[in-house]
């Protein structure tokens, strides 16, 4: 089943761990906040996505079934 | 079912007192029942929803969401979760240029309160709240307290109504900010989901409707869907309250059918006259665009604009659209709740760059020729990345200004400005939020 990343922009403090662990789907803007690809996650990236979700220090990143 | 005996009716105004009303007592309970008749309770949950759907009523707070779908969602969530819902009338219009909800609450408070009772009955709510701004000009709070006393004496209200006031913040009327504030917190947005129709105030299914929307609902309950559709377009039926500001800057509230030509609202438009539609989260249009358009979302989609809460402003020829835009964007940046990184970082930068452009300190003689490109890039960067629509609305306003005032940007690049009057035209509230207390 396809999954999708969702960032809670209020909780996010721009630590940047997610972009480091999942550069295929998350890039940083010029102020250090994540720009998340809104499309469903391409196959093969689920493991890294889960790692990015658990690495977020403010628990702002979630993986949703789309 | 409603007896739709009155048939279609094209007479306006429906919500506001007729212009020939010299007694100025439309807010009085007896004058209200004389004009509109008794409150038509349906004695059953849900039955009003079918009428609202047939009428095609949409939210008049700006989003134009179908009202019956919200009512249905709250009713279903209440059934499913076995929780009694809450209904909230939102009269806290936050656009500084809008004055229609305050005017409606001042002139026809009972119509809004009728709608609140009928909506409560339709979804089975046991609590109703009316949320308004502290008075701007009129003491709306005192008038509402008086209205509620009259209704208590007449014994009409079945659900108790609490009055609540919003802090004077731009975002205070945003739905999640409203819930946050009524829960005892600051009036700042929260991140959805869950939807507040499922879990809103104190976790119960919550219906939030704009004050004007409830007034229309109260009339649909009395006169039926066919009557409601007597004005407006087939896709967007009914009337709406519009706030119109012309050269003198004074807001005029008029009730107009959806689909009315913009020129009928603001007068003849020269091609060099700019029009602001939808307020500070809205869209600037050129006069030559605006004079072909009508006030409905179908027509306005052609220029990526929306009816919103019905604000239509023409910029006087002696003012500069860039300077006005820069003033407003500075205000909008200061009104960010500061919770989301892109909004917190992007809006002040956009505001500062616009001030630079408006001040003529860029281009050939200035320091940063790339400032225009910066504004465009930042606008693209912040849109869609907030918990609420503040960055989206602000950047819509900014991008439309750069398009409509492109010639003025060139003029500023050469160190000139077409304004002959320096006094700002678009209204900006004086006090920016400084501490957390200002959001409570």
Image (cartoon, rainbow, N blue to C red):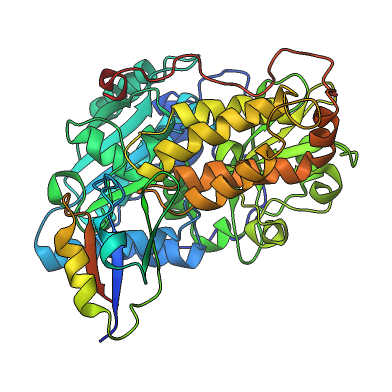
- The residue closer to the viewer here, B364 or B323, is B364
- The residue closer to the viewer here, B34 or B68, is B68
Tell me if I can see residue B45 in this picture.
no
- In terms of image quadrants, where is residue B254? top right
Up/down of B160 relative to B366, above or below: below
Q: Residue at x 30, y 68 (%)?
A: A22
- The residue closer to the viewer here, B83 or B332, is B332
Residue B194 placed where, x, y %? 23, 58
Residue B156 placed where, x, y %? 27, 37
All told, the count of numbered labels is: 0
Quadrant of the rendering where the N terminus of chain B is positioned: bottom left
* Left or right, residue A2 beside residue B140: left
Residue B391 placed where, x, y %? 47, 44
- In terms of image quadrants, where is residue B358? top right
Outermost residue, left side:
B82
Q: Residue at x 71, y 12 (%)?
A: B423
Tell me if I can see residue A56 in this picture.
yes
Q: Residue at x 79, y 37 (%)?
A: B274
Residue B111 placed where, x, y %? 43, 37
Quadrant of the rendering where the C terminus of chain B is positioned: top left
């Amino acid at each position: 089943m396809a999954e999708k990343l969702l960032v809670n922009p209020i909780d996010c403090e721009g630590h940047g761990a997610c972009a480091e662990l999942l550069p295929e789907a998350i890039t940083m803007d010029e102020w250090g906040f994540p720009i998340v690809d809104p499309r469903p996650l391409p196959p093969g990236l689920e493991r890294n996505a889960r790692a990015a979700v658990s690495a977020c220090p403010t628990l702002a990143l979630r993986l949703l079934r789309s | 079912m409603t007896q739709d005996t009155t048939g279609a009716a094209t007479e306006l105004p429906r919500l506001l007192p007729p212009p020939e009303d010299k007694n100025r007592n439309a807010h009085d309970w007896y004058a209200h029942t004389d004009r509109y008749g008794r409150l038509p309770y349906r004695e059953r949950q849900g039955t009003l929803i079918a009428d609202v759907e047939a009428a095609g009523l949409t939210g008049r707070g700006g989003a134009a969401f179908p009202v019956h779908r919200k009512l249905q969602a709250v009713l279903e969530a209440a059934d499913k979760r076995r929780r009694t819902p809450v209904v909230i009338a939102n009269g806290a219009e936050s656009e500084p240029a809008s004055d229609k909800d305050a005017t409606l609450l001042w002139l026809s408070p009972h119509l809004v309160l009728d709608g609140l009772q009928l909506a409560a009955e339709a979804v089975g709510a046991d609590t109703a709240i009316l949320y308004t701004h502290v008075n701007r000009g009129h003491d709306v709070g005192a008038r509402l307290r008086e209205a509620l006393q009259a209704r208590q004496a007449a014994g009409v209200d079945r659900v108790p109504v609490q009055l609540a006031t919003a802090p004077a913040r731009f975002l205070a009327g945003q739905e999640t900010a409203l819930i946050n504030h009524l829960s005892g917190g600051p009036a700042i947005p929260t991140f959805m989901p869950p939807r507040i129709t499922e879990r809103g105030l104190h976790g119960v299914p919550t219906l939030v409707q704009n004050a004007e929307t409830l007034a229309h609902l109260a009339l649909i309950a009395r006169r039926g869907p066919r009557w409601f559709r007597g004005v407006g377009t087939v896709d967007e039926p009914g009337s709406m309250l519009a706030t119109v500001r012309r050269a003198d800057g004074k807001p005029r509230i008029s009730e107009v059918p959806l689909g009315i030509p913009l020129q009928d609202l603001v007068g003849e438009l020269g091609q060099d006259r700019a029009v602001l539609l939808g307020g500070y989260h809205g869209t600037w249009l050129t006069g030559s665009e605006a004079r072909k358009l009508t006030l409905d979302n179908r027509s306005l989609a052609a220029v990526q604009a929306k009816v919103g809460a019905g604000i239509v402003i023409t910029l006087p020829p002696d003012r500069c659209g860039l300077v006005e835009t820069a003033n407003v964007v500075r205000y909008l940046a200061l009104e960010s709740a500061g919770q989301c990184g892109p909004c917190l970082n992007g809006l002040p930068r956009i505001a500062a760059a616009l001030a630079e452009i408006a001040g003529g300190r860029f281009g050939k003689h200035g320091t940063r020729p790339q400032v225009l490109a910066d504004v465009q890039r930042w606008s693209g960067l912040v849109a869609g990345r907030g918990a609420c629509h503040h960055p989206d609305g602000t950047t819509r306003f900014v991008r439309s200004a750069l398009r409509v005032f492109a010639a003025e940007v060139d003029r500023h690049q050469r160190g000139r400005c077409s304004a002959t009057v320096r006094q700002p035209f678009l209204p900006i509230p004086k006090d920016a939020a400084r501490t957390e207390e200002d959001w409570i």
